[in-house]
Image (cartoon, grey):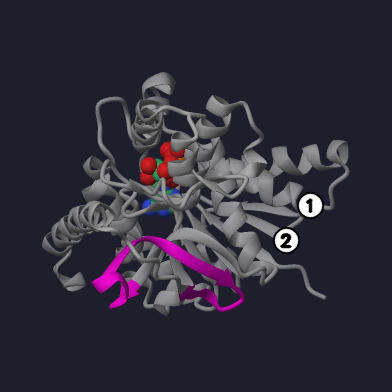
Amino acid sequence: MARKKIALIGSGQIGGTLALLAAQKELGDVVLFDVQEGIGPGKALDIAQSAPAQGLAASLKGTSEYKDIKDADVVIVTAGVPRKPGMSRDDLLEINLKVMEQVGAGIAKYAKNALVICITNPLDAMVWALQKFSGLPANKVIGMAGVLDSSRFIHFIAEELGVSTEDVTAFVLGGHGDTMVPLTRYSTVAGIPLTDVVKMGWMSKEKLDSIVQRTRDGGAEIVGLLKTGSAFYAPAASAIAMAESYLKDKKRVMPAAAYLDGQYGVKGTYVGVPVVIGAGGAEKVIEISLNSAEQKAFDKSVGAVEGLIEACKKIAPKLA
Ligand code: APR
């Protein structure tokens, strides 16, 4: 059987980590694309030279030409600029929107059968624009945010309780921004909802609230520490988990920025919801019931995403 092909558009901090993880998991041949010539080939060579020491059958190529992504099975997009301290994800909108236009054209020309996973921020608006610019079906263009946000939430909960992250599940809905909605009712420790964990007295309500807030601010905390860029290990690991579910048709239920066509009462917008990811891409959006407080928080988050999409339409009228 032919090896799969994974194209990474953007070979910066996240792109390089994606390449390493894809090689380590032997998901397929990796192509590292970047507008900065040298960065893709340099990282490809470095990782390829690590393969013998790691005992891996890796094949990597770096490029600045879109033709090299031809017939990719998965395309993961990190092209653009990351945040600096003091910037919000939304501050990146105008510059990264232009990048999405170029990337969308490249994908449309060379990889129209791929599953496209967008990571570039502001995520929900960029994945929406990328789907429009590429013209790929909406179920084949998804955004990575929920897996990362959930992973951050799980890490903080497990650390606080002194339990394995393997036994914690978490659920984060909504846009990838300050309005994201970590759902405590649907997040569990060994099957016990966090709301019950509080009732049992295992964690205080105040502590849980502070973890929810720290999850919302998870990206900014790392930007503040790194000072020269944003998080890259956890975002890359999260996108690789999504790619793996697609390539192996695992049908995992993962929170992802998916196109909503009426689900949750939302139409024509990308926003973070639970999705079945399998060989068909985003195969099914799972609609969970929300109580009034959760619905309110979700609506606010959707409103924030819609605001960014309107801003995109003003900058690029052909998206309207
Ligand atoms: N086409 C291809 N690559 C591009 C383009 C373009 N038009 N414009 C910029 N790039 C490349 C840059 O040359 C750089 O190597 O995208 C890469 C981005 O890498 P980093 O600056 O290291 O950023 P990274 O930390 O990887 O984050 C990328 O993901 O999480 C989001 O907010 C983050 O939007 C940012 C993106």
Name the residue rendered at 50%, 50% in the picture: 147
Q: Amino acid at mark 2?
A: Gly
The reply to whether the residue tagged 2 has its Cβ within 8 angstroms of ligand 1 is no
Q: Is residue 12 visible?
A: no
Which residues make up the magenta segment? 260-284
Q: Is residue 280 above or below residue 155?
A: below
Instruction: Place residue 204 in its image quadrant.
Output: top left
| Horizontal relation, residue 162 to residue 281: left or right | right
Q: Is residue 112 left or right of residue 50?
A: left
Instruction: Give the Cα separation between the discs numbered 2 and 1.
Output: 8 Å
Q: Is mark 1 within 8 Å of ligand 1?
A: no
* Viewer-closest of 156 and 196: 196
Q: Quadrant of ligand 1?
A: top left
Instruction: Please state if 264 lies on the left or on the right of 15 as rendered.
Output: left
Q: SS of the residue at dot 2?
A: loop
What residue sits right under mark 2 in the picture?
A: 28
Residue that numbered label 1 is attached to: 58
Q: Quadrant of the N terminus?
A: bottom right
Q: Residues within 10 Å of mark 1 (few under 14, many from 20)?
A: many
